[in-house]
Amino acid sequence: MPQEYQMIAVQEVLPEGMLFVRINCILTTMVRAPVIAACFVLLVLSSFVQYAVGSPKVLDFTIYTDGTTHVFYQTDVDSQSPDSALNLYGNSIENLVVQDENGTLLSSRVNQSTATVETLGSSTIKADYDTPDLISKNGKTWTFHVNSTIDYSILLPKNSVIVGMSVSPLNMQIVDDQSLISLPSGSAEINYIIGVLGTSQTATLAIQKAQDFINTLTSTGVKTPMALAKLEEAKLDFNQGKYSDAESLAAAAKSLALQEQQTTNSVSNMSSDNLPISVLIVGGIIAAGAAGFMIMKRKRSSNSITPSVITKNNYIAPDKETIYKLKPELRQDDKDIVAFISEKGGQVFESELRKKFLMPRTTMWRAVKRLEREDVIEIEKVDQQNLIKLRKPEETEK
Amino acid sequence: MKALAIIFLALVGTLIINGPIQSYADPQLDALLQIATQARENLKMNISQINNVPDEITRLFKQGSDETDALSNAIDKKDVVSARQHFLSAMNFFKTTNDKINSLNVTQVNNQQQTDTLQLQSEITRLAKIGETLKTIAITNHASFDFTQFDQLIQKAKQDLDNGNISEASKSIEEANHIVIDAHQSLTNVAKQRTPDRAKDFTEKQIERLDKMGSTSTQNSMTQAPKVSTTSKTSSNFTSYENPKDTVAKLKKLAAAGKVDEALKVIKSFEAHQK
């Protein structure tokens, strides 16, 4: 009551228009302010604590155009235990390196899809390795499949487009022309195509095709100023990284060149009506001769491509279907290789495989090594070349 | 006043527990649309290259395209659940469409030069990355391995590829690959060589830790009834003692005899028993 009395006294003394604040309201606000501040501090701290205490696991997959996947996995381990078991993605593991939180290299032993790492007091391990087992290929579609217990990210190769996805991504961003996708834990399948329309590769092809067509026309005396101008625009867009536009412009350049050719032909047809028949006959003979020469040349070149004759010392080629049955887990591209070797009588040179599947040396070497590990093939050195032979089913079964 | 404070604290508490999880669970809707649209555009162009497109392909593609439009509408309405459903449905239709196109086998581009260049570029990137990782590890671990030749080969491969010399680039890449294999082997050997020293340090630290644990438990047992030591057979046929004091004694004995491997097994079984 004395407080109320004082307040009234103050109110009476106050001049007109002056703001009046009740004392008990100030007191309540003063009490609440620290509570609110404490709550905000708690909120801010919680995010830091969750970041530090929460799952520190990191799992990144980097996919390369030859179907190899680089895996980076970081996780916390028991620092009191002398070793730690690490589940690996895939059975064929290459270039495995394991480091601790300080970058110290740790010794490890790989057994199938598990690595035993001698952690010896480390609290975190970081593993880097390559595996071809996460990707399969059917036609020109590549499929990445993984079953992860934690959230992870995938970096797809350049010039690739996703055409199928079994899960909703958490995020996606473009990093250096590559799609970086974050995915939730669980099983996921991503289907993608490399070198599709709209990318630099196909834009290059379109420009090249248009350029070749214009060059051919120019060599026959057809002038194509409009097509050339359009092609220059395409090249300009390509240099600026506008591949889709470049491709459209290149296609337009080719169409213009075709139009210009038709215009020139219609003009020349009008004048050629007066040409003597003998000139046409001579022209026809020259064309036939040129065609004959080309056919001869092609035959010769195809003969020269044929690799050195493989001597078959009573070698009986195993049936590809038997191999597929024994090795159902083979990748589609590996099955294609097996099918090709089988068609060729069960043995081919590695160089033939490279030519058939349009693969560079190292990529084919890895594929061959993979099949060798699976006991599907064996490699023999013949005249400093690798002769790839399909193993007999009973050998494969072992 | 008190009730208000309690409600406010409860609110903050809920935010602390659920906040980050909820925000993490929300997918980036733009990403969904971006992926679906890219797939649609790509398939559209692929289909345009086919003569006499089968009805099934046209139908499947249209269904995927309709689902993409529905996805776009769901995103406009900020309907996350519906957007996800339409995305998965669209991608499923696109995948089936793509499989059907693949079975026709008409869109294969057989340009060896292009394929080789793309593959080799990827190979160079992959090798360069592995090389960088191995270099960093070698420096951190004071392991001597000369990467000069590797760097030169990678540079040469890049130049050869730029000049269209695919066979030379391929050779350089192969040589660089061999160096990576050698470097990896060399670093693996370094790790193996250093493991016994690390194992010894680890054993000593564990003896120290268990010693402290033992003395603490002894102090505690002064006021309590004495704890009976139980033994258990581990998978490695080593007898593990629940009492840290006994384990320390055993470890000290093994360490003094230079049997670090056996000491590690004892530590492992002790840790397993503690859990």
Image (cartoon, coloured by chain):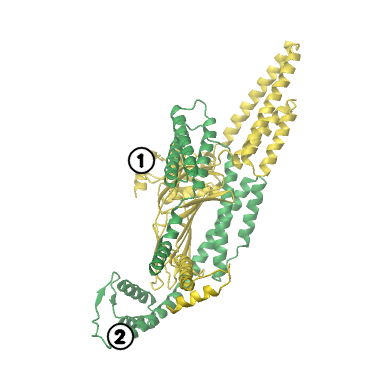
* Image depth: mark 2 or mark 1 in front: 2
Q: At which x and y percent is residue A257?
A: 69, 28
In the rendered view, would you say B159 is above or below B200?
above
Q: Secondary structure at mark 1?
A: helix
The structure residue drawn at horizontal position 66% and vertical position 51%, both measured from the top left corner, is: B159
Nearest the viewer among B84 and A207 is B84
Specify the amino acid type for callout 1.
Thr
For the residues marked 2 and 1, what is the alpha-carbon distance in whole angstroms? 70 Å
Residue on which the image places disc 2? B220
Q: At which x and y percent is residue A29?
A: 48, 70
Q: Quadrant of residue A159?
A: top right
Task: Point out the residue furthest to the bottom here.
Answer: B222
Per the rendering, the colour in which chain A appears is: yellow
Residue on which the image places disc 1? A322
Please give the letter of the chain rendered in green: B
Question: How many C-alpha atoms fall within 10 Å of the one at disc 1: few (<14), some, or many (≥20)?
Answer: few
- Picture disc at residue B18: none
Q: Indicate the chain on which mark 2 is placed.
A: B
Question: How many C-alpha atoms fall within 10 Å of the one at disc 2: few (<14), some, or many (≥20)?
Answer: few
Q: Indicate the chain on which mark 1 is placed.
A: A
